[in-house]
Amino acid sequence: MAVDVLLGLQWGDEGKGKIVDVLTRKYDIIARFQGGPNAGHTLEFENIKHVLHTIPSGIFHKGSKNLVGNGVVIDPIIFKKEVEALKKYGVDIQESLLISRKAHLILPSHRVLDAASEASKGKNKIGSTLKGIGPTYMDKTGRNGLRVGDIELNDFKQRYDALVEKHKQILSHYEYTDYKLSEMEAEWMEAVDFLRGLNLIDSEHFINKAIKENKKILAEGAQGSLLDVDFGSYPFVTSSTTMCAGSCTGLGIAPTRIKEVFGIFKAYCTRVGSGPFPTELNDATGEKLREKGHEFGATTGRPRRCGWLDLPALKYAIDINGVTSLIMMKSDVLSGFETLKVCVGYEYKGTKIDHLPYSIDDELVKPIYKEMKGWTEDLTQLENYDDAPQTLKDYVEFLQQELGVPVTIISVGPNRNQTIHIENHPATA
Ligand code: GDP
Ligand code: IMO
Ligand code: MG
């Protein structure tokens, strides 16, 4: 059986958590393939609002296995808190949560290094979530990292001490002294003990066996394509492969196993952290989007920057991911905007282009907008696409034509139930 992939097409926070939760009933296994506690995936159902950081968003469905893949980076302290928060909902963690031994560990000193690196960059800082993501992936590719499987080894503490020693040397180069490692370490070691008691597995074997047994698997991405380390707005990106290819390396599955690729985008656009954002609205309209959409980070609480939908960026993300099905989120937030703007190209160095150029720095790229009539109707109670306002249908139709991929789901509110399946697409029906 094939693997389906679900990922964000913008700068993250598109609503991946909600849709994974909606789709989980159709899958046996939900597998996170990259990122770590920089992610915040929000789920809402039965008056519960839950934010998951490292744990896959299928965890609330009895019967689904949730795998934290080898491409993920885990902070044991945050992980322990997440697991403990789930217990009160009756989630059987031993039964439903599996963790790859090859996933890398975020050490307290990685978090300190993240803070030191950001401080050293001054006004050019990335706007990192400060969860230690960059330094941990650097240690992974630099072949210094510690992995989950290492906590089962007798010499784990020596390995830990050796890595921390390296980190201290780097910190001394930064001349960064604003930390007390010993206090953070005690809690971390306790959380490592907790992690040791969970279901640690050789996940690449598990997942390939599941494929052979015709199990249905959904790979859940974190962040978004414009934060991808290769194809995002570098250097203002995260440190992992957020695109579809990351599901292969982050789970140990072959590209030939991938079938559907669900690409999620907001009906507008947001970004949190630094970096270029061509369609950003630094005005009352941007403020209205932020207020109506409650655009504040699920992990850091930071206000998200808001702007209009950017089609060249979306086309780019669709291409690099091979998206087969589009999911449009937060359609309800656009209710009440008389005119909607959609970026259809850019003025770039004096010429008009319709693709994403090498650099999208604000001074180089000016968006060209198409204006469309908005809708006034409240969408949050909408149950059927046929009953949607014509102006919303026109918006969706225009996007499908421009992007060349069907929009199969639109979301009209944060709740699991506020989800509209547009057509009998085999993957979403
Ligand atoms: P993720 O990181 O992609 O999982 O997205 P986040 O959870 O960080 O951010 C999405 C936010 O939008 C969360 O607060 C969701 O509860 C909320 N949300 C998701 N879909 C919708 C929607 O269709 N309408 C509205 N109004 N909110 C939504
Ligand atoms: P989800 O999965 C939105 C952003 C940070 C920063 C940059 C690098 O919830 O969509 P990092 O901590 O990774 O070094 O930060 O990436 N960022 C996200 N923005 N959603 C996320 O995850 C993000 N994860 C990281 O704000 O600009
Ligand atoms: Mg998020």
Image (tube, helix red, strand yellow):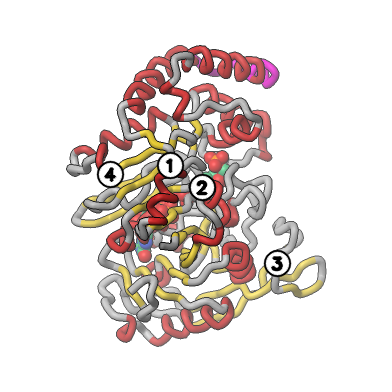
Query: Which mark is in front, 3 or 4?
Result: 4
Is there CB contact under 8 Å for labels 1 and 2? Answer: yes
Element assignment for label 2 = loop
Q: Is residue 356 visible?
A: yes
Query: Which amino acid is tagged 4?
Result: Ser
Mark 4 — residue? 96
In three-dimensional space, the C-alpha distance between marks 3 and 1, rounded to whole angstroms, equals 45 Å
- Is the residue at mark 2 in contact range of ligand 2, meaning its CB lies under 8 Å from it? no
Marker disc for residue 279: none
- Residue 99 position in % (x across, y down): 39, 38
Residue 360 picture quarter? bottom right
- Residue 253 position in % (x across, y down): 51, 52
Mark 2 — residue? 252
Q: Is residue 303 visible?
A: no
Of callouts 4 and 2, the N-terminal one: 4
Query: Which amino acid is tagged 2?
Result: Gly
The residue positioned 60% from the left and 42% from the top of the image is: 239
Q: Which residues are magenta?
A: 171-180
- Decide: is 69 above or below 367: above
Marker disc for residue 366: 3
Name the quarter where the C terminus is drawn: bottom left
Mark 1 — residue? 203
Element assignment for label 4 = helix
